[in-house]
Image (cartoon, helix red, strand yellow):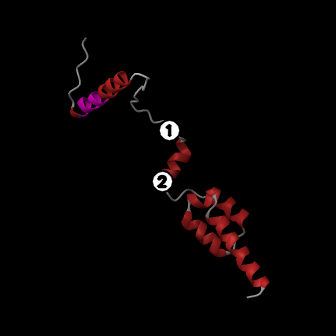
Amino acid sequence: MTGEENAAITSERLRITGIIMSAEGRRNPELALEMAESGLDVETAKRLLAKAPPANPYIAAMDREGQIGLSAATVDVTSDPKTARLKELEVSVAAFNAERGWTKKAQS
């Protein structure tokens, strides 16, 4: 293999990788692969992929809604191990009771 052939192969691999592994390409891998196989240059393919809807509906929803903050019960770990363990048990028991519907009714 000559140096020119080796350079051409390397250049082609970099072009294909640039399309498939770009953020736009990862949003729609099948379309990215088609564009890479068609011979499009990286910048054109990325521009077109950015305009295409994501292949995964979850990703489309994340693009539309943005990141969400999940809130869960957290345990406040202090320097006192007994207090930390009691708080951990309190959270665990509350979750257990709520899961089974054994929560106390609010007093009116």
Q: Give the camera-side residue of 82 and 19.
A: 82
Between the C-alphas of marks 2 and 1, the distance is: 16 Å
Q: What element carries label 1?
A: loop
Which x, y percent locates residue 87? 34, 24
Q: Which of marks 2 and 1 is nearer the N terminus?
A: 2
Residue at position x 66%, y 70% in the image: 16
Residue at position x 62%, y 56% in the image: 23
The three-letter code of the residue at mark 2 reads: Pro
* Residue 68: assigned label: 1
Residue at position x 67%, y 73% in the image: 13
| 72 in relation to 50, above or below | above
Q: Where is the C terminus found, in terms of image quarters?
A: top left
**Residues packed near mark 2 inside 10 Å, few (<14), some (14 to 19) or many (20 plus):** few
Looking at the rendering, the stretch of residues picked out in magenta corresponds to 92-99
Residue at position x 39%, y 30% in the image: 73
Q: Does the magenta stretch include residue 96?
A: yes
Q: Farthest residue toward the top?
A: 108
State the image quarter where residue 66 is shown.
top right
Q: Where is the N terminus found, in terms of image quarters?
A: bottom right
Q: Closer to the observer: label 2 or label 1?
A: 1
The three-letter code of the residue at mark 1 reads: Ile
| 90 in relation to 19, above or below | above
52 left or right, relative to 83: right
Q: What element carries label 2?
A: helix
| 34 in relation to 105, above or below | below
Query: Which residue in the structure is indicated by mark 2?
Result: 57
Q: Give the camera-side residue of 42 and 88.
A: 88
Which x, y percent locates residue 36? 64, 71
